[in-house]
Image (cartoon, helix red, strand yellow):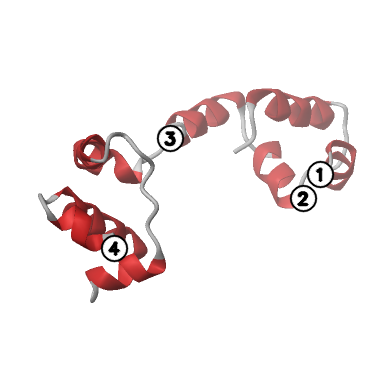
Amino acid sequence: MVKKKMYQKIQTCKRQGLLKAEISRKLELDPRTVAKYYEMSEEDYREYLKKHNYRFKVFSTYREDVLAVYRLNGNAKLNVTSREYAKVGGLRSRLACIFAFAKIMAKPNLGEAAG
């Protein structure tokens, strides 16, 4: 996503009569990026920002679970190795492995056995 200043620079160049390729070279931007923002009106750009400003945070759903694991480990950084992932077994995604491992670590007495 191009920040407002860059959008404004593209629009200024456009008003000066520069072609998209010239703007791309002058501002050192990808030609596709210039083409995208070249065609946007100020209102289109504001709508685009509204639509793309919110980022879905993958871990937000698991925030309390992750914090609980950190608390159980004295807020120490969790160093999870590929061997430890393997102990979880049978899970396809890396994210699923991380949370499965965190659940195992959160269970009393299993944390010591997993290390």
The numbered mark at residue 31 is 2
93 left or right, relative to 71: right
The amino acid type found where label 3 is placed reads Lys
Q: Residue at x 50, y 30 (%)?
A: 49
Query: In terms of depth relative to the viewer, which is nearer, 56 or 105?
Result: 105
**Local crowd size for mark 4, using a 10 Å CA cut-off: few (<14), some (14–19), many (≥20):** many
Q: Quadrant of the C terminus?
A: bottom left
What residue is drawn where x is 35% and y is 38%?
76
Q: Mark 3 packing: few (<14 Cα in 10 Å), some, or many (20+)? A: few
| Residue named by callout 1 | 20
Q: Secondary structure at mark 1?
A: helix
Tell me the CA gap for discs 1 and 4: 46 Å
Task: Check disc 4 and give the amino acid type.
Answer: Cys
Which of the two discs, 1 and 4, labels the residue nearer the N terminus? 1
Q: Position of residue 3 (x, y in %)?
A: 64, 29
Mark 3 or 1, nearer chain start: 1
Residue at the spot x=70%, y=23% of the render?
5
User: Of 115 and 55, which appears nearest the observer?
Assistant: 115
Instruction: For marks 1 and 2, give the one nearer the viewer.
Output: 2
Residue density around tag 2, few if under 14, some if 14–19, many if 20 or more, within 10 Å: some
Q: Which residue is identified by label 3?
A: 51
Label 4 sits on residue: 97
Q: Is residue 105 above or below residue 36?
A: below
* Above/below status of 15 relative to 18: above
| Residue 92 appearing in the image | no
Q: Residues within 10 Å of mark 1 (few under 14, many from 20)?
A: many
The N terminus - image quarter: top right
Q: CA distance from mark 2 to mark 3?
A: 23 Å
